[in-house]
Amino acid sequence: MNNVVNGRQMKENEIVTALKISETKDFQQMISTLGLYVNLNQINSEVTEAYMMDAAIEAGDVKAVQKVTHNFAEKAKIEVFNVVEKAGETPHPYIYGSAIVENCIGEKIVHEFTAINGKVHPLTSYLQPVEDNEAAEGLKLNEDPNYEPFSSITAQHVFNGEGCFPGYRHCGKNCGDGKKTGGGEPTENLDVCCRAHDRCWSNFGTSDPCCDKNLISCSKATSGDKVLKDLIASYFANNASKC
């Protein structure tokens, strides 16, 4: 099983096009919401991430994803995922925002939101996790200068959506308790999120929107493989927005 997700850093002209999302109502509403927690007027934002990749979580179902992260001096950030469901379709933006507030005992609390159809909805709040440098090997984002959306997704380039993601026992198609692969004790907190998602689908039906929303909330509130968390946030965003 290959654990390389094919993609590349975005080019300057692609970033300029992607930044036009900042003119939309969803983006501006997110700015206003985060401003209730952090004074964004005194902070300049910068783009700290800009990459594109093919995402395949379900076997045979591929989405092309662009991710651009606007960082406000580590006190707030807005992540924009432009997701193309099928080749030739118009990208659909999904916007996540977070603000970090320090409480009276010095703990950093992260407040997460999502913007949909001009309205901002609370997603989750949690104690900022400490990233584990000794985490499982996980997925790697390949830097392929020839990458174009949908054109290079092969078994040699990307996990093909069948089986467990590297280092996990519950994250992936047909992965988990009673499935073809994996199962048993979760390897880390993100794996716990995936197991809960499997159980939610078992109870409420496959592709239940609120199960998908809870998976996104859970993955954002825990440490774990960064590329896999981005795959979850982008792949399940459309269905989760129906919750």
Image (tube, grey):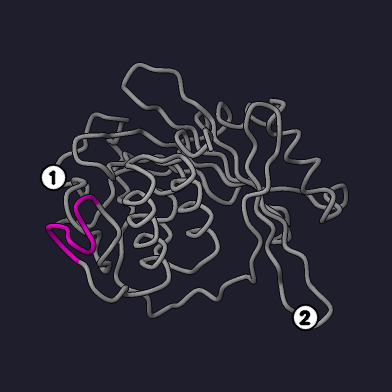
| Residue depicted at 30% across the width and 51% down the height | 142
User: Element type at marker 2?
Assistant: loop
Which residue is more in the foreground, 65 or 182?
A: 182
- Say which residue label 1 marks: 155
Left or right of 69, for residue 167: left
| Residue depicted at 34% across the width and 42% down the height | 205
Left or right of 41, for residue 149: left
Mark 1 Cα-neighbour bin, 10 Å: few <14, some 14–19, many ≥20: few
In the picture, residue 95 is in which quadrant? Answer: top right
The numbered disc on residue 106 is: 2
Q: Position of residue 126 (x, y in %)?
A: 64, 66
Label located before the other in sequence (1 or 2):
2
Q: Is residue 238 above or below residue 183?
A: above
Mark 2 Cα-neighbour bin, 10 Å: few <14, some 14–19, many ≥20: few
Tell me, yes or no, whether the two marked residues, 1 and 2, touch with CB atoms within 8 Å.
no
Q: Is residue 48 above or below residue 14?
A: below
In the picture, residue 110 is in which quadrant? Answer: bottom right
Which residue is more in the foreground, 231 or 48?
A: 231
Amino acid type, mark 1: Ala
Q: Position of residue 207 (x, y in %)?
A: 36, 39
Distance from Cα at disc 1 to Cα at disc 2:
46 Å
Q: Is residue 188 above or below residue 117?
A: below
Q: Position of residue 132 (x, y in %)?
A: 45, 77
Query: Residue 96 in magenta?
Result: no
| Residue depicted at 82% across the width and 55% down the height | 37
Amino acid type, mark 2: Gly
Instruction: Provide the residue span drawn in magenta.
Output: 173-182
Which residue is more in the foreground, 72 or 202?
A: 202
- Magenta span dominant secondary structure: loop
